Image (tube, rainbow, N blue to C red):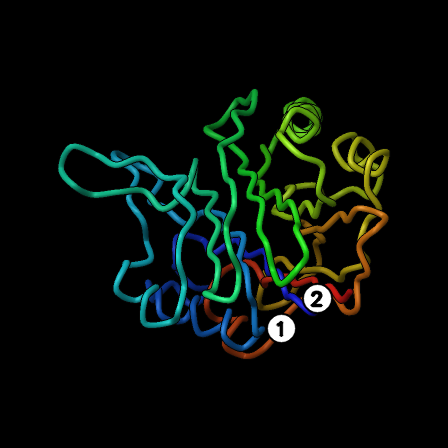
């Protein structure tokens, strides 16, 4: 069994070149060969939140979205919860998903999704944390509590944009007490990355066969963040 999970702050599909181009985001995920994608900033931020990735385009690229977004009375829908979305390929079965409400100074949230791939079950958490360090620590404790209360006990993989520049930040320290950090390079800003804002933490039982920052020419242009990925093997 091999499965690849990507985490990607897609910056509302506006690239580092200032152009809105949702197709590039999905092309980058194709380059990675992702089976699951945890997205941040997948919805518009102002007014009624709506998806920046058209449903027809998701279908063409073979993606199905977890039912995390809110349907508006105009018929338009958000893809995720405060911009956090989960996409799965047809080879992956989504068995459970729900939103995690976070204490925040800004509109922030996290999402949880349980998936089945072959005979293996995995719990994924995608998050986009606050710019404030104090808020990030509280948010991470809320995520840890939500994971502990979720039904079942599959091994977890926590990924996202944690907005933490420091190695010893309180939010990262809280995570490290529960899961091991996956070694990754800098991912922000995309054109010349210096900050490790996008991170991954894995349950000790998971075998990480490969992990990295996807830094193709297309990825450097498609968003202001580079995507990260973790490839798990049985």
Which quadrant holds the N terminus?
bottom right
Secondary structure of the residue carrying tag 1 is loop
Q: Kindly report the distance in space between the C-alpha atoms of the residues bearing marks 2 and 1.
A: 16 Å
Residue 122: image location, x then y, percent: 66, 50
Residue 16: image location, x then y, percent: 47, 64
Secondary structure of the residue carrying tag 2 is strand
Question: Which residue occupies 51% across, 32% down?
Answer: 109
* Tally of numbered discs: 2
Q: Is residue 72 above or below residue 113?
A: above
Question: Which residue occupies 44% across, 74% down?
Answer: 27
Q: Which residue is mark 1?
A: 215
Q: Is residue 134 above or below residue 96?
A: above
The residue carrying pointer 2 sits among few (fewer than 14), some (14 to 19) or many (20 or more) residues within 10 Å by Cα, namely some
Residue 172: image location, x then y, percent: 78, 37
Q: Which residue is mark 2?
A: 231
| Left or right, 230 with reference to 109 | right
């Amino acid at each position: 069994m091999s499965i690849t999970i990507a985490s990607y702050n897609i910056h509302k599909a506006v690239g580092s070149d200032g152009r809105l181009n949702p197709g590039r985001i999905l092309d980058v995920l194709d380059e990675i060969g992702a089976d699951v994608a945890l997205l941040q900033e997948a919805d518009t931020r102002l007014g009624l939140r709506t998806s920046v990735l058209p449903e027809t385009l998701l279908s063409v690229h073979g993606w199905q979205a977890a039912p995390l977004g809110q349907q508006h009375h105009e018929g338009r829908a958000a893809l995720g919860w405060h911009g956090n979305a989960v996409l799965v390929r047809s080879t992956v079965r989504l068995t459970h998903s729900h939103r995690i409400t976070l204490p925040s100074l800004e509109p922030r949230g996290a999402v949880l999704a349980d998936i089945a791939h072959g005979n293996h079950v995995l719990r994924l958490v995608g998050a986009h944390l606050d710019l404030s360090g104090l808020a990030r620590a509280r948010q991470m404790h809320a995520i840890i509590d939500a994971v502990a209360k979720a039904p079942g006990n599959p091994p977890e993989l926590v990924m996202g944009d944690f907005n933490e520049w420091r190695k010893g930040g309180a939010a990262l320290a809280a995570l490290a007490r529960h899961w091991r950090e996956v070694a990754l390079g800098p991912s922000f800003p995309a054109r010349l990355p210096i900050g490790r804002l996008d991170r991954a933490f894995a349950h000790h039982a998971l075998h990480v066969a490969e992990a990295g920052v996807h830094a193709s020419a297309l990825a450097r242009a498609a968003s202001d963040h580079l995507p990260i990925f973790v490839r798990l093997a049985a």
